[in-house]
Amino acid sequence: MSPPAEPLQDSTVRELDRLARQAQHDWRTPGLSVGVVRHGRLGWSAHVGSGRLDPAAPADDDTQFLIGSVTKTFTAVVLMALRDEGKLSLDAPLSTFLPGTRHGAVTVRQVLAHASGLQREPVGRIWEGLQPPDRDRLLRELEDAEQVLPAHYAFHYSNLAYALLGEIVEQVDGRPWEEAVRARILRPLGMRHTGLVPDEQSRARGYYVHPHTGVPVEEPLVELAATAPVGGLWSTVADLGRYAAFLADPVEEVLRPDTVDEMCRPLIMIDPEEWTRAYGLGYDLQRVGGRVMAGHAGGMPGFVTGLRVRRSDGVGAVVFANSTAGAEPLGLAGQLVAAVLDREPEADQVWQPSSPQPHLDGILGSWWTEGSEIVLEVRDDQLWARVPGGPKLSETRFEPDGLDRFRAVEGRERGELLEVVRDHEGLVDRLYFATYPMTRRPAAFADVAARPT
């Protein structure tokens, strides 16, 4: 459970307001709507400019914007929920759901991670005629689509691939894609103003602003048909803020926390030369100023969206701009999160004494393996291992797994066993972690090998 959020300080609010106003001015977007979520609630929002023109009308926290490819993350969440229910495997090939397709060897996991190598768009020049395919055409023309790269050779963004995931959702869940999303995500999270069909009277209007004249032209709405799971959802600052809060602190009714963790692990690098950006199972991951943030960007004619969440700190940001080009909503979302964390870092939790742990007698303290020291200690009544002076990633948390056995459940060598070996008097003689011997004194491999077991 997240701690209650304190109100943001006035100086932080002024900086967030400044970033929002500067972005709206520099991007030359008719309107900009932004919000910051901290520990489960919307702590700040701002609406600069106009959500619609002629006549000009400001947006508010419940004004609907087309979120574009942020929709893909909803498709991914539903698929992972179906996986958790045992209804599909991420390693199932597409042929399981689309028998006879020539792309049948590509797996669901590869599609989720944009590692399938499938061409970017469905067959045809859909962004010229603005006529995405219906289901029959999508599946029929799939056989004309190219696999432009070998699977998992490189990150290659594919709207076609995610349209196929929408088809898989409908097959496995047994409901239309939107109904599955509404039942599994929108209702449990209270996202009442999110869906495929907006309120025409109050929604934002999307515009193309000419780069030379500065004159905005209203963009047409595109009927996405079978590609709705790719980018068709409308949402609001308040609703997408609820979704950001879920990404930071998952709700079991929607998805298990460990499954969200799995989705936010990098599977393929987006920038293999720099190693600052990767893609997981539906979520884009980026290192921003030393912090890794999860989320996604979205773009459709007249609208761009950015979602960034620093999950470990419970802070996220959503950004909407009602313009086709020139905006960088994902970058601004990262800036907003960083501004809150830099200005208002979380205080360390109050240390609490541990309870006696008699089953750990003889186990705690310094041990040596491979010439290096490892310290076993108790934190919050749990067994931890750390390397003195080492990075946090070298730490490990254990849980009991039978008599004189502990399983690594977090950190280094997760999943491996820590085994306790006792002498004839029942005293702890040595340990084995992932089969490596651990001794009380520094020892060479030769000395350890010479000792009787």
Image: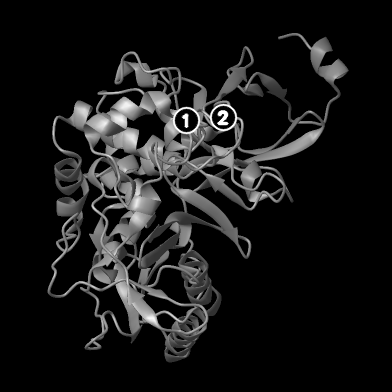
Q: CA distance from mark 2 to mark 1?
A: 7 Å
Residue on which the image places disc 1: 110
Can you give x and y, in whole percent of width and height, for residue 197 in the image? Answer: 16, 58
Q: Residue at x 48, y 71 (%)?
A: 327
Up-down: is 117 above or below 306?
Answer: above
Extreme residue in the top direction? 452
Residue 256 in sight here = no
Residue on which the image places disc 2: 152
Extreme residue in the front direction? 129
- Mark 2 residue element: loop
User: For this rendering, which residue is in front, 255 or 224?
Assistant: 224
| Sequence-first disc among 2 and 1 | 1
Under mark 1, the amino acid is: Gln
**Around disc 1, counting alpha carbons within 10 Å, would you say few (fewer than 14), some (14 to 19), or many (20 or more)?**
many
Under mark 2, the amino acid is: His
Picture quadrant of residue 52: bottom left
112 displayed left or right of 270? left
Can you give x and y, in whole percent of width and height, for residue 234 in the image? Answer: 24, 60
Q: Quadrant of the C terminus?
A: top right
- Disc sitting over residue 20 in the figure: none
Q: Residue at x 48, y 50 (%)?
A: 284
User: For this rendering, which residue is in front, 240 or 428?
Assistant: 240
User: For this rendering, which residue is in front, 91 or 156?
Assistant: 156
Can you give x and y, in whole percent of width and height, for residue 398 in the image? Answer: 50, 35
Q: Residue at x 50, y 42 (%)?
A: 265
Up-down: is 148 above or below 306?
Answer: above
Task: Count the marks.
Answer: 2
Residue 306 in sight here = yes
- Mark 1 residue element: helix
